[in-house]
Image (tube, rainbow, N blue to C red):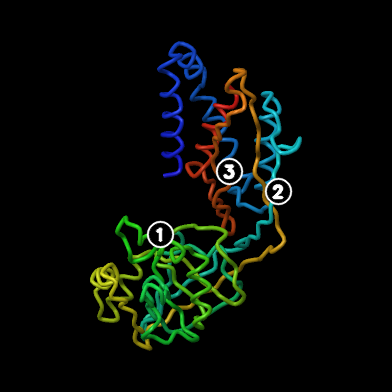
Amino acid sequence: MKKQVLIVLLNVLLTGTLCAQKEVDLTTLHSISSNELMEFATELSADKYAGRLSGSPEYLEAAKWCASKFKAWGVQPANNGSYFQYFSNEYSSVNSLGSVVYFNGNEKTYLDFPEDYLPGSNSASGTVHAELVYVGHGITAPELDYDDYKNVDVKGKIIILESGTPYTKNDETLEKWTPYAYHRYKFRNAVKHGAAGMIYASKVANPNTVNLEGFIYAHVDPKVVTQMMADAGKDYQQVRTQLKNMETPSFALPAEQKVFIRAETKYFPEAQACNVVGMIEGADPDLKDEVIIIGGHLDGQGKMGDVIFSSALDNASGISDILGLQKH
């Protein structure tokens, strides 16, 4: 989605100027080579950058490479003589794929990576083995008269959590729900209620949420959750429909249903990342003080154990578009 937004933005900018300067803009546009853009994307997706996880040394190396291109093309540094704008960026490294095991009475199912699960990118390191409680979106919002935890006790349990919020109408109320959609909020609220661990019912490699001491989790494919629900006598699709209707269908699964999660991670609370900022000064004396900002996120999903998420589509491709624009 971010790449699509970038492309649309570039198209809008180009279309707006084509009306007045068709010949000049077409010449500039056609000077950008798709092969060149592919070279940029291939470089940024290389294993040496290890998926460009923000805060990691590999991310900083990727940032240095981008800055070297800016310098070579005559793009001026835009942060008091520097191409880099540093900021604090805690992160966690996932040192092994860990494991997730589902128990249903005497039956034991080992989940497969990456088909069934992904390690929690900011999980604490360690193990958790506990009963399961479904908590919907994991939201406690008194001002909205909504609480996924109101009828369940999750102390010492592994929660099954959904992403997003139950509110889907595009109106002024949606803004009030937005803070409750963030991963950081959901994780902190789970810990506040005493959860020992979490199954995130969304198999997404989502880095740099928040590291909470002792809180162990994994992302699990919804098809696995569907089976867990079926084993508990529940129709997962029906439960999610109740959730969309804001009925807060939270419940504890039978005691014989448990999950074991093992995570091996390392937390870096003092890490830094940076923006790479450059400037091309305009030549028109009447317009040169006006600013057009074109940006995209350089960071990616990093790696899990020895598995590198090269993050080519999200977002080496978008950065390559910007580099091509900068060069020409």
Q: Is residue 303 left or right of residue 71?
A: left
Amino acid type for the residue under numbered disc 3: Leu
Residue tagged 1: 175
Query: Tag 3: Cα neighbours inside 10 Å, few (<14), some, or many (≥20)?
Result: many
Q: Estimate the x, y position of residue 123 in percent, counting from the top left.
A: 56, 69
Q: Estimate the x, y position of residue 63 in percent, counting from the top left.
A: 66, 41
Residue tagged 2: 86
- Residue 41 visible in this rendered orientation of the protein: no
Please state the total of marks drawn on the protein image.
Answer: 3
In depth, the one of 165 and 228 nearer the eye is: 165
Q: Which mark is nearer the camera, 3 or 1?
A: 1
Disc 2 and disc 3 in contact, CB within 8 angstroms: no
Query: Disc 3 or 1, which lies upstream in sequence?
Result: 1
Q: Estimate the x, y position of residue 178 in percent, counting from the top left.
A: 43, 61
| Residue 187 in the image: above or below residue 258 | above
Amino acid type for the residue under numbered disc 2: Tyr
Q: Estimate the x, y position of residue 226 in percent, counting from the top left.
A: 30, 70
Write down the quadrant of residue 12 in the picture: top left
Residue tagged 3: 298
Amino acid type for the residue under numbered disc 1: Glu
Residue at the spot x=44%, y=66% of the render? Answer: 180
| Residue 148 in the image: above or below residue 42 | below
